[in-house]
Amino acid sequence: MRAGQKIKEILKTSPTGQLVTVMGWVRTFRNNQFIALNDGSTNNNLQIVVDFAATPEITLKRITTGAALRATGTLIASLGKGQTVELKADTIEIVGDSDPEKYPLQPKKHSLEFLREIAHLRFRTNTFGAVFRLRNSLAFAVHTFFNERGFVYMHTPIITSSDAEGAGEMFRVTNLDITNPPKDSEGQIDYKQDFFGKSTNLTVSGQLEGELAAMAFSDIYTFGPTFRAENSNTARHLAEFWMIEPEMAFCDIHDNMNLAEEMLQYLIAHVLQNNKEDLEFLSNRLEEEEKQKPQNERSELSLLHKLQFCLDNKFERVTYSQAIEILRESNHNKKKKFQYLVDKWGVDLQSEHERYLVEKHFKKPVILIDYPKEIKSFYMRQNEDGKTVAAMDILFPGIGEIVGGSQREERLDKLELRMKEMGIPAEDLSWYLDTRRFGSCPHAGFGLGFERLVLFVTGMTNIRDVIPFPRTPKNCEF
Ligand code: ATP
Ligand code: MN
């Protein structure tokens, strides 16, 4: 079957009359003569010229939008505009028919909402072709980045019994009969009879296990699926998303920030270099979309400029306390334009505040550090002031939080005390505390939400459009 060539490669060659075979799906068929064929290797179609006088009527009828076909012929210079080469077909074989009356994708512009409903077919559009090739490229670059720096890729468990992380609501994993679960003597569901002999969940983060590995390999990273049953129906939250979590031993919050910044810039530089065509397509797409908006809501930078901007500017490092001051003194706050007004130190920042800091005040990516300990997790390292912890969030324009991380509390006594204050039973995490008992050392790490990165890089606005099959509240199709 194979022995064909990718259209992306063919479009790069010079036409010397060589014989080639291609396979792909018909995007359009004009004048019973010109097929635009796409095989997903690029958004650019290969034009196939059909000799309609020599082609049986019945074959011509079957060349419809969506049909799969294989064509063999000679590669010649194209006279038409928009391409340098085209294929003069000798044979055309219909591999799979597509009824044009029923095929949901017509050669016209469809809304993203409509395409979300037919996510099984949306890969065949230019927009999603570009988005998912970029997603692939970014995933590949994540592994390259860490491997070049000697990090060990660690697979942390997906099913877990640790429920102390507190990062979000969890999905329970069970094979008990939910209509008639076994009960214990107190009338509670008896998880001792469950598959694992205890209550288990899908992981909300691989961090705690990642820390265990970092205490042996020095530098590790995870890259895997993460699950949160948070009922927040936003354009930035999924119930199933992919997270990248590096963890480094002998590393403080500043090394951590530097690594995160270096990684983000590396990933952006990688796609600017390797995915220019798809980025240009998405940049143009976004510009068209911006034109629909009122002048004052349009973004000042094109997608390509925005990405370049992130490479040319060092991320601004700001403490939580400084951020609160900026927000409190802002005209936005004084004119009550925030939904949640910023009045006192200690409040958690809402995404409107994060976006104000990034988009209006600093106008570049911002790293916020030293958050109040009350609004952060138990494992974050306590600062000398007794009020804040060495946490860091990286905020991106249009996205808000893209990375969340911290230096971890490596001092056993301080960690145990904080757990007690927060009501986290030490018995449940004795394995975690062991790292602080045996060869503890300063260490730090962060989590990058992969889809938030893909959102930023592609300029898409809804996180449902950058993962192939999104899982969100009341939605689990495919
Ligand atoms: P947010 O405040 O945006 O909900 P968070 O504080 O819950 O984020 P963390 O627990 O620090 O986030 O998770 C690390 C990273 O994972 C975040 O910076 C973000 O990029 C990503 N992330 C978190 N929750 C989701 C989600 N539901 N869907 C997609 N990505 C997410
Ligand atoms: Mn969250």
Image (cartoon, rainbow, N blue to C red):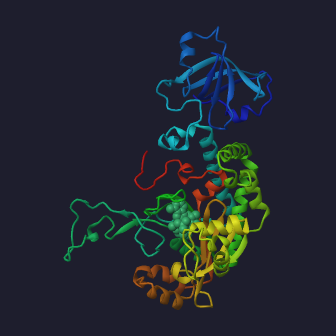
Q: Is residue 355 above or below residue 318?
A: above
- Number of marks: 0
Q: Residue at x 42, y 82 (%)?
A: 424
| Image x and y of residue 225, in percent | 51, 59
Q: Residue at x 49, y 58 (%)?
A: 238
| Image x and y of residue 77, in percent | 79, 23
Q: Is residue 478 above or below residue 310?
A: above
Q: Residue at x 41, y 84 (%)?
A: 423
Q: Is residue 320 visible?
A: yes
Front residue (pair 164, 361): 361
The quarter of the picture where residue 124 lies is: top right
Q: Is residue 245 visible?
A: no
The quarter of the picture where residue 14 lies is: top right
The quadrant the N terminus occupies is top right
Front residue (pair 300, 396): 300
Q: Residue at x 41, y 66 (%)?
A: 170
| Image x and y of residue 52, in percent | 64, 11
Instruction: Left or right? Give the position of 172 relative to 442.
Output: left
Furthest residue toward top: 53
Q: Is residue 367 above or below residue 226?
A: below
Instruction: Left or right? Give the position of 423 relative to 223.
Output: left
Furthest residue toward front: 335
| Image x and y of residue 193, in percent | 26, 68
The quadrant the C terminus occupies is top left
